[in-house]
Image (cartoon, rainbow, N blue to C red):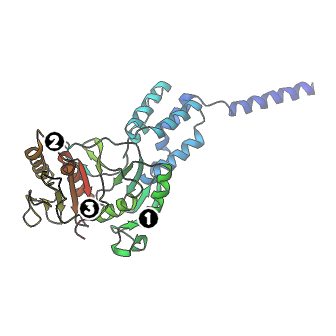
Amino acid sequence: MKRLALALVLVVLLAACGSKNTEQSFREGMALICKVGEDPDLAHANPVERQAAMSRWLDERVTNARARKVIAAVGEANPQDRARLIREAAGEAGVTDCPIVAEAAPGAGLELPTVPGDVALAEVPEGVTMVITATAIVVEGEQIVAVRDGAVDPSELDGGARGMKVTRLEKFAGALAAQDPGPMLVAVAPGTPYRVLMQALYSVKGSYQALHVLARAGDALGAVSLTLPTAPLASGVLAPAPDAEPPVQMVLAITQRHALLWSLSGTEGTLRQPALTVAPDDVTRVRAALADIAKRRWEGRARPDEDRRIVVMADATQPAAIVVPMMAAARESFPDVVLSTGFE
């Protein structure tokens, strides 16, 4: 009788252990994925730290093999496709309430510069992300340096207070590029001064040549693709090929009070006598003037590569909220936007 009682106890204990180790279903796994952002420990996390925290949370709790494949697929997908992948997987699992879908879109949770709704932005590519906020420069969820009162500490700059390279950021980007060559997506807070944006970009340009500044046009997220000069801006005209017209070399300069449209060649205004002088946030008129130049000069005929380029420079204190929309407007007619350090 005692043996029978002992056997029954063992059966009950084994059954209890088995119930604790019951394999997680796909539906249960997807329910965790869908509600990850509502966990009290994550709900109020800093946006730049939130993604890494959610990844750790999911890794600890999601054990279903199929649900883990969804997590992996979302991590490897183009940013534009992530929300769709989660929504489709949740539908297959029968999970109808999935708040994380809205947060899966690139740039979600971050305040970004906005451009007029009819300004064309490029598609956001897949890549590594650098976030520049009012308090820090963060790459792939890791804070590299602090930002205080609209500036990076001079001790972090190569060359001190007037330096353009953030030493620690340059080293981090170099090591990261060896594992993931990019491109790099740059999410910059609207209030970020142009100088801080340029310091961040110049620090990574040796490792990431393809740079894309994120912006919003209405509800849509897009990017402004740009390059940085490898040498100081020339003061004269590039040498043209024999019998060829010299390149126009358009420049958009944004001072504290004005936006000035001119050309290094002098054929479309000069710095002293610009082709256009408007308020620094007058995207509409700058956009129209550049479209007119492009149409008047190159419509119906081959356009040299040099004439696809425009240099954008700005006063160090101009915020990204002013500069980024101007960059986007310039890119419509002059696809190769080159940022310069401006009036230094």
Secondary element at tag 1: strand
Which residue occupies the foreground of this view, 94 or 58? 58
The kind of residue on which mark 3 rests is: Ser
**Residue at which label 1 appears:** 145
- Mark 1 or 2, which is nearer the eye? 2
Look at the image and tell me in which quarter the C terminus lies.
bottom left
**Residue at which label 2 appears:** 302
Q: Position of residue 27 (x, y in %)?
A: 53, 28
The kind of residue on which mark 1 rests is: Val
Label located before the other in sequence (3 or 1): 1
Compute the Cα span from label 1 to label 2. Answer: 46 Å
Label 1 Cα neighbours within 10 Å, binned few <14 / some 14-19 / many ≥20: some
Q: Position of residue 192 (x, y in %)?
A: 30, 61
**Residue at which label 3 appears:** 340
- Horizontal side, residue 162 vs residue 235: left or right: right
Which residue occupies the foreground of this view, 41 or 139? 139
Q: Position of residue 113 (x, y in %)?
A: 27, 52
The kind of residue on which mark 2 rests is: Ala
Label 3 Cα neighbours within 10 Å, binned few <14 / some 14-19 / many ≥20: many
